[in-house]
């Protein structure tokens, strides 16, 4: 049984640590710089009070990474309590003010009273690298989406017919917009010359794209005010989106190569609908360590594919999607379930059975995703790959 509990309210430049004894009395309160010498000094002072200590934090990555690794490298027991839980618990303590010291006190007191908090353990190098790469990919994808939306807005302002005709998720339309942005420019070039121009830049199906662009140009002969400067902005945005596409393609190669070096890659990728990217996102979120969650049910709850009850009084069986869950894990299981419906007979039969029971499309896919959590859990537990059919046994 621990003798003291140390709660740390994590900050960008400074942390605040409060230590409580078994009676809940404060024995230490200190604001420390997020710097290794300061953190090591705090660790030594707390261990001087009592070596039997449980540490608690309200942030599990990012600006808490240095402090977490200092504690784990020194063999300390560390638990995690989400910031939202700290905020909700603070309402039950005396006083309405909010300070770092009070938050740290709440964190330490919750660690003292609760036995269901997540224990933080060191992640392996593979999981950390995959987390960095997948987070970087997510940032690039968000930047690309923002620029495509701006590009659509600018193009609609001067040439709405062309915006309707182009799918800016493909490379060909972006190459077209890097050279031609206005109806007059497309009409002057003509279909044949535009087709040759696109073919020289290795655009797929240049005939169809050139025909669609020239047809849109023939539908608009009015020059909109500000067309010239808007065309320059469209040219710049198209180049930026193309550059982001190249960066995403490059990081996809890095993710796939790093994922396939993991010991569990073969098992995870054997599941229908899960490729290198989704497998990497799964490992980035879980590190492939199922012992952290105890059961498949807890993993499903974390992924947001297990319904939670909201019963009250005489109302029972009122199930809803959880409000708190890991968005990345939910994307992995939900998207892979959608893909598996198309290429896995067992998944398709399960989905069709749920639809026949009267469930909507989203409900049926979530039910399939929940079932796939159990399957992947069992595969990782047993260290074996997925098999679409049971092995045939012969009688002796």
Image (cartoon, helix red, strand yellow):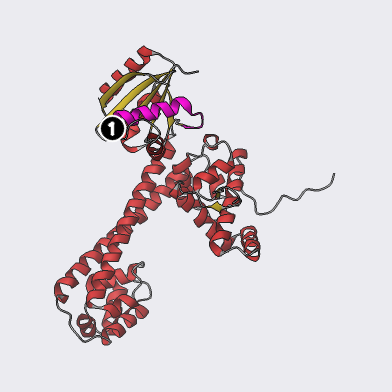
* Quadrant including the C terminus: top right
Q: Which residues are magenta?
A: 101-118
How packed is label 1: few (under 14 Cα within 10 Å), some, or many (20 or more)?
A: few
* Rendering quarter of residue 192: bottom left
Residue in the foreground of this view, choosing between 196 and 389: 389
Asked if residue 103 is among those painted magenta in the image, a careful observer would answer: yes
Q: Residue at x 55, y 41 (%)?
A: 298
Nearest the camera: 19 or 35? 19
Q: Is residue 328 visible?
A: yes
**Residue 361 left/right relative to 200:** right
Residue nearer the viewer, 167 or 259: 167
Secondary structure category for the residue under label 1: loop
Residue to which mark 1 is pinned: 99
Residue at the farthest right position: 396
The x and y percentages for residue 388 are 65, 54
| 254 is within the stretch colored magenta | no
Q: Position of residue 110 (x, y in %)?
A: 43, 29
Residue at 37% x, 38% y is 87
* Left/right of residue 264 with respect to residue 124 in the rendered view: right
In the displayed structure, does residue 219 sit left or right of residue 301? Answer: left
Q: Position of residue 114 (x, y in %)?
A: 48, 29
How many numbered tags mark residues here?
Answer: 1
**Where's residue 340, x and y in %?**
56, 58
Could you tell me if residue 181 is visible in this image?
no
Location of residue 243 by image quarter: bottom left
Would you say the magenta stretch is mainly helix, strand or loop? helix
Residue positioned 29% across, 60% down in the render: 146
Task: Looking at the picture, tell me which residue is in the foreground, 8 or 351.
Answer: 8
């Amino acid at each position: 049984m621990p003798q003291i509990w140390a709660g740390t309210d994590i900050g960008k430049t400074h942390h605040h640590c409060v230590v409580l004894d078994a009676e809940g009395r404060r024995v230490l309160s200190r604001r420390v710089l997020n710097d290794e010498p300061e953190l090591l000094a705090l660790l030594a002072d707390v261990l001087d009070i009592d070596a039997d200590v449980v540490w608690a934090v309200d942030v599990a990555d990012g600006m808490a990474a240095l402090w977490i690794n200092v504690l784990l490298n020194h063999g300390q027991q560390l638990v995690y309590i989400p910031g939202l839980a700290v905020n909700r618990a603070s309402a039950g303590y005396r006083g309405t003010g909010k300070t770092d010291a009070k938050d740290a006190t709440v964190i330490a007191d919750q660690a003292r009273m609760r036995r269901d908090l997540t224990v933080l353990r060191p992640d392996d190098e593979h999981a950390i690298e995959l987390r960095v790469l997948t987070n970087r990919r997510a940032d690039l994808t968000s930047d690309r989406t923002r620029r495509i939306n701006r590009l659509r807005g600018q193009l609609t302002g001067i040439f709405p017919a062309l915006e309707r005709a182009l799918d800016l998720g493909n490379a060909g339309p972006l190459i077209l917009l890097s050279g031609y942005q206005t109806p007059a420019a497309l009409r002057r070039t003509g279909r044949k010359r535009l087709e040759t121009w696109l073919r020289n830049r290795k655009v797929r199906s240049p005939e169809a794209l050139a025909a669609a662009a020239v047809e849109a140009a023939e539908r608009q002969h009015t020059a909109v005010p500000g067309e010239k400067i808007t065309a320059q902005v469209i040219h710049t945005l198209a180049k930026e989106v193309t550059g982001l596409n190249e960066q995403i393609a490059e990081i996809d190669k890095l993710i796939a190569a790093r994922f396939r070096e993991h010991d569990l890659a073969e098992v995870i990728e054997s599941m229908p609908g899960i490729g290198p990217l989704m497998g990497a996102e799964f490992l980035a979120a879980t590190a492939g360590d199922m012992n952290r969650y105890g059961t498949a049910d807890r993993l499903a709850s974390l992924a947001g594919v297990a319904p939670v009850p909201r019963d009250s009084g005489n109302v029972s069986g009122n199930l809803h999607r959880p409000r708190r869950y890991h968005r990345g894990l939910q994307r992995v299981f939900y998207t892979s379930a959608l893909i598996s419906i198309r290429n896995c007979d067992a998944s398709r039969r399960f989905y069709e059975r749920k639809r026949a029971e009267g469930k909507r499309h989203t409900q049926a896919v979530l039910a399939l995703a929940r079932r796939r959590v159990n399957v992947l859990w069992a595969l990782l537990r047993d260290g074996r790959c997925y098999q679409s059919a049971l092995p045939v046994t012969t009688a002796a």
